[in-house]
Amino acid sequence: MHKLWRRLGSPTDGAINSARLKAKLDYKNALKEASNNSSKSCSTSLSISFLNHDSTSFWKIWNDKFNNKNAYIGPVSGFSHPSDIASAFRDHYCTTFVNSYDDLSAVNEYSEILNKLNENDDIPSVDIDIIERCIAKLKHNKAAGHDNITAEHISYSHPAIVLHIKWLFTMMLKYSYVPDDFGIGIIVPVIKDHHGDPTSVDNYRPITLSPVISKIFENLLIEHYANYLCTDDLQFGFKKRLSCSHAIYLLKQTIEYLTLTIAMCIWPHWTFLKRLTD
């Protein structure tokens, strides 16, 4: 309508101008309605997550709605060219890399267990139901790994892919072989503190984008060996139904207990301070 109005010489009255003004008003009203609906939908989702005590979903919705922080685009460690910045991050993360083979006690323990295994030992069963459960655990709307395969490719593909994955994982378990590509990941630096120095590599934490197929295999291993994967009771990260809020609560309760104890003069002050630093 606007182009037609301009081609006719931009008249200030008449049917064409009236239609143009009406279309403009309808467009503005549609934008307002969409904005209001978006706000209502966000408020409803936040309320549902809060009532269901789903802190993960609550903060995800909150951050998507209100934490619209622009990504930093600029020099890092004095470098401006993308390849130079990538090299700076590579050199930095190489200093924090831990080689599993350096832990000799763990290597020896694994070797002893491996030597006790018999080739005739039964391998864990891999059936269709387990593979479907492992695929269902994949999170959508996530970036792909080096193979450009996303979770949606697996979830929405032909059901026959479940059978092929079953055969693949069965052979991997039978012959104790994991493809090298399963261990390849894309490291993406993510800024830690938006109020800190964005030009320093120390202000970035690495996130690894792993292949989706390897994530399904990890889910399969957890299905079979979750009971053997024991962690410390004081670990709160990367565990189900635990988060930083539980760690903060434990810290507060500990400080309150120690404060009450020292107030009752049960412990000397220096003993109290030592317990806090331990």
Image (cartoon, rainbow, N blue to C red):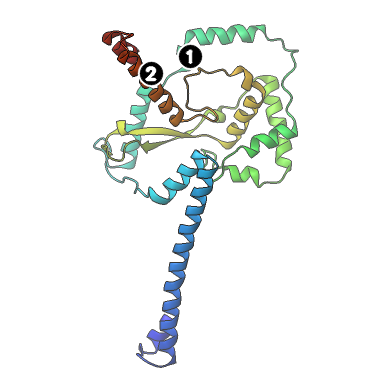
Above or below for 120 versus 141? above
What residue lies at 61% left-to-right and 17% top-to-bottom?
228
**Crowding at mark 2 (Cα within 10 Å: few <14, some 14-19, many 20+):** few
Query: Residue tagged by mark 2?
Result: 257
Q: Earlier in the sequence, mark 1 or mark 2?
A: 1
Mark 1 → mark 2, Cα distance in angstroms: 42 Å
User: In front here: 194 or 216?
Assistant: 194
* Element on which disc 2 rests: helix
At label 2, the amino acid type is: Tyr
Q: Marks 1 and 2: CB-CB under 8 Å? A: no
Residue found farthest to the bottom:
14
Whether residue 81 can be seen here = yes
Residue found farthest to the front:
264
User: In front here: 47 or 240?
Assistant: 47
Left or right: where does residue 189 sit relative to residue 235?
A: left
Return the x and y of residue 124 as percentages of the image width and height: 72, 21
Return the x and y of residue 242 as percentages of the image width and height: 51, 29
Query: Residue tagged by mark 1?
Result: 101
Left or right: where does residue 128 sit relative to residue 247?
A: right
* Element on which disc 1 rests: helix
What residue lies at 36% left-to-right and 20% top-to-bottom?
255
Q: Nearer the viewer, mark 1 or mark 2?
A: 2
What residue lies at 44% left-to-right and 48% top-to-bottom?
64
Residue 205's image quarter? top left
At label 1, the amino acid type is: Tyr
Quarter holding the C terminus?
top left
Residue 129's image quarter? top right
Return the x and y of residue 231 as percentages of the image width and height: 53, 18
Above or below for 48 versus 210? below
User: In front here: 89 or 5?
Assistant: 5
What residue lies at 75% left-to-right and 30% top-to-bottom?
127
